[in-house]
Image (spheres, helix red, strand yellow):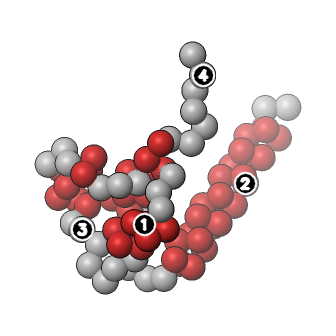
Amino acid sequence: MVEELVPPDFIVSPLLFEETFMQPSIPNLAQLGLDGKLNTIKNRFTAWRIFLGILPKTGPIEAWIQRLSELRGKYSEITEAQRVNSI
C-alpha cells in the first residue's frame, strides 16, 4: 500500500481556495467542526488549521505564510534542542 504524501483534498484549484478561504466571511468553521461537517469544506487541511487557531481567521494570505514560518521556526528550535539534549 502506497501512502499519499499530499492528501487528495489538499490539492484544490486556486479559484475554489479563494472562494472558500479568502472571503471576508469564512464559514463558521467552529460550528461546522462541532456539527461534524468540516468535510463539507474543500481543503479540510486548511480548514482544520483555521478551526484549531493555527491560522488567523482574517487577514491576507501573507499573514498565514508568516504564521506558518514562525511555527516552523519554533518547531525547528524544539527539535534541535531535543536532539542536543539526547546526545
Q: Earlier in the sequence, mark 3 or mark 1?
A: 1
Query: Label 2 sits on what residue type?
Result: Glu
At 25% from the left and 61% from the top, the residue drawn is 29
Q: Is residue 10 left or right of residue 71?
A: left
Q: Nearer the viewer, mark 4 or mark 3?
A: 4
Residue tagged by mark 1?
Answer: 17
Foreground residue, 83 or 18? 18
Q: Position of residue 67 (x, y in %)?
A: 56, 70
- Other residues around mark 2 within 10 Å, as few (<14) / some (14–19) / many (≥20): few
Q: Residue furthest right?
A: 87
- Other residues around mark 4 within 10 Å, as few (<14) / some (14–19) / many (≥20): few
Mark 4 and mark 3: span between their CA atoms?
Answer: 34 Å
Helix, strand or loop under label 3:
loop
Up the image or down, 22 lies above or below 39; here it is: below
Q: Earlier in the sequence, mark 4 or mark 3?
A: 4
Q: Position of residue 74 (x, y in %)?
A: 66, 58
Query: Label 1 sits on what residue type?
Result: Phe
Q: Nearer the viewer, mark 3 or mark 1?
A: 1
- Other residues around mark 3 within 10 Å, as few (<14) / some (14–19) / many (≥20): some
Residue tagged by mark 3?
Answer: 27
Query: Label 4 sits on what residue type?
Result: Val
Mark 3 and mark 1: span between their CA atoms?
Answer: 13 Å
Residue tagged by mark 2?
Answer: 77
Q: Position of residue 46 (x, y in %)?
A: 43, 58
Helix, strand or loop under label 2:
helix
Q: Earlier in the sequence, mark 1 or mark 4?
A: 4
